[in-house]
Structure formats: structure tokens, C-alpha cells
Amino acid sequence: MTQITSAPSLEAAPRDSDTFLWDFAGVDGLQAAIALFTPAISRLSPFQSLTAEFDQQPCSVLRLCDNNFRVALPGPMSFEAAIAALPLNIWVKPCPAAVLVLPVDFGLARLSAIATIKPIYRLSPFPCERAVPARINGLGILAWHHCWYGQPRLEIQTAQANIQAIYQEIY
């Protein structure tokens, strides 16, 4: 049974990004990812990503855990409808995170200087198609280094309430 959570208005979710993020998960989350994108998704470990296509447009798919995924799409596409059409036990909702897109070289250096991480994660090296959960001045972030239209991109995703403080710490 697919569960759809309605999208917040775009005015309520200001972003410094040209992507639209969606989260989906559930018992059949991996099967949905394979059906929508590519069987290669099954070989990703948590916090690894790949570039795929959705509705003939490039997108990035991040595996957050076994059956939980985040998708970056280039526009407000019919992702909800595609998930709803699958006869699988999953839910989908727009990702509520605020997003900062940083210049890659600057962002990688700055994150290494100010972010704290758990010992199992690394910010140096921080290869493309990876994400790292971290903290900046005690505030939780997810740094996602991935390809967007063939170019490396570094995104900082955090709670809406934390975006201004994160921005000030980075810059």
C-alpha cells in the first residue's frame, strides 16, 4: 500500500538549490528504487548515490539505508504518481530539508575544517557519489557530494530551522 504525503508549498520551503528532493521508504523501498531507476541501486551501500534517469531527465538517487532513498529531481515532476503506480508497500513525501549548494572545492575544505563526524565516516577524502552525516556547531547536516548534469555538486541538507546558522558557520 503506497502512502502519499502532500507536498508543502514552495513558498514555505525556500531553497538555495535547483533540485526538488523526494524521500521514499518502506518494506519495498529497494524494489521501488530498482523499478524506477536501475538494478544497480541494489549494489549501493548506505550513503552512496548514483546518477540515473526519471521521466527522461537526469536525477541523483541516494541510498540512506536498506530501504530508504532520497531522490534529487531537476523540477517538480510526477514522482508521486510514479510511486503510487507501483503495487508496493512504500511511502513517499517531499524532503523537508533546506539545501545549500556550495562550490565544491571551497565546500569540501570548509566542511573538513568545521564539521564533526562519527568515526565511521570521512570528509577527507570525500569522493563524488557519497553522503556524510555530520554536525556543524552541534546542528545536524547531511553533506551530499554527487554529480548533477555531469558536474560535481556539493549540497548541505539540514532542517529549515537550522539553515541560517549553518550558512553563517560555513561563510
Image (cartoon, rainbow, N blue to C red):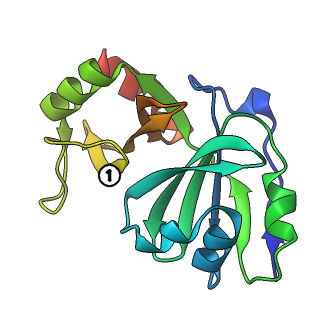
Residue closest to the far top: 171
Q: Residue at x 71, y 40 (%)?
A: 57
Going by the numbered disc 1, the residue's amino acid type is: Pro
* Residue 59 visible in this rendered orientation of the protein: yes
Relative to residue 159, is residue 24 depicted above or below? below
**Structural crowding at the residue carrying mark 1, measured as other residues with C-alpha within 10 Å and reported as few (<14), some (14–19) or many (≥20):** many
Q: In the rendered view, does 158 fall on the left or right side of 125?
A: right
Q: Residue at x 25, y 43 (%)?
A: 127
Q: In the rendered view, does 118 fall on the left or right side of 49?
A: left
Indicate the quadrant where residue 20 lies.
Answer: top right
Which corner quadrant holds the C terminus? Answer: top left
Q: Position of residue 14 (x, y in %)?
A: 65, 26
Indicate the quadrant where residue 2 lies.
Answer: bottom right
Q: Position of residue 103 (x, y in %)?
A: 36, 18
Which corner quadrant holds the N terminus? Answer: bottom right
Q: In the rendered view, does 123 fall on the left or right side of 44?
A: left
Decide which of 88, 141 is in the foreground and name it.
88
Indicate the quadrant where residue 45 lies.
Answer: bottom left
Q: How many marks?
A: 1
Badge 1 is on which residue? 133
Q: Residue at x 37, y 28 (%)?
A: 166
* Residue 4 visible in this rendered orientation of the protein: no
Decide which of 110, 131 is in the foreground and name it.
131
Q: Residue at x 55, y 63 (%)?
A: 69
Helix, strand or loop status at disc 1: strand
Q: Position of residue 139 (x, y in %)?
A: 34, 42
Relative to residue 106, is residue 8 depicted above or below? below
Decide which of 139, 55 is in the foreground and name it.
55
Relative to residue 28, is residue 52 depicted above or below? above
